[in-house]
Amino acid sequence: MTLEELRVGETGIVKEFTDLEMSVKLMEMGCLPGEPIKVSRIAPLGDPIAIHVSGYQLSLRRFEASTIILQ
């Protein structure tokens, strides 16, 4: 399951990434393997997605969220 598939209020744990280049960017922002991640909001047209990770809120595009694989 990827982060893109979660609905508002659902949580997951980051397992790995599908895109090496994007994974570096995401890990710099706190999306590390083993971190719990929760979807806070989704924009009306579905893009971007607001998530809560590592104690702060972060907005990601759907493409970015699709590269995060959850446990």
Image (spheres, rainbow, N blue to C red):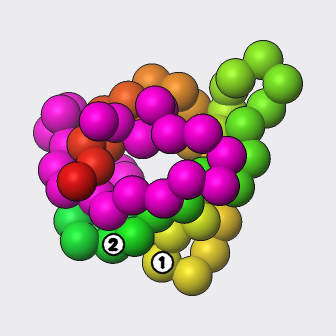
Q: Position of residue 19 (x, y in %)?
A: 20, 33
Q: Position of residue 36 (x, y in %)?
A: 40, 70
Q: Quadrant of residue 17?
A: top left
Q: Quadrant of residue 43?
A: top right
Image quadrant in which the N terminus is located? top left
Q: Is residue 32 left or right of residue 3?
A: left
Residue 32 higher or lower than 26, as above or below: below
**Disc 1 and disc 2 in contact, CB within 8 angstroms:** yes
Q: Position of residue 47 (x, y in %)?
A: 68, 26
Q: Residue furthest right?
A: 44
Please name the amino acid that badge 1 sits on: Ser
Instruction: Pick the residue in front: 33 or 19.
Output: 33
- Asked if residue 4 shows in the view, the reply is yes
SS for tag 2? Answer: loop
Q: Is residue 16 left or right of residue 68?
A: left
Mark-to-mark CA distance, 1 and 2 = 7 Å
N-terminal-most mark, 1 or 2:
2
* Residue 18 lies in the magenta-colored region: yes
Q: Magenta stretch?
A: 1-26
Q: Position of residue 6 (x, y in %)?
A: 50, 39
Please name the amino acid that badge 2 sits on: Glu
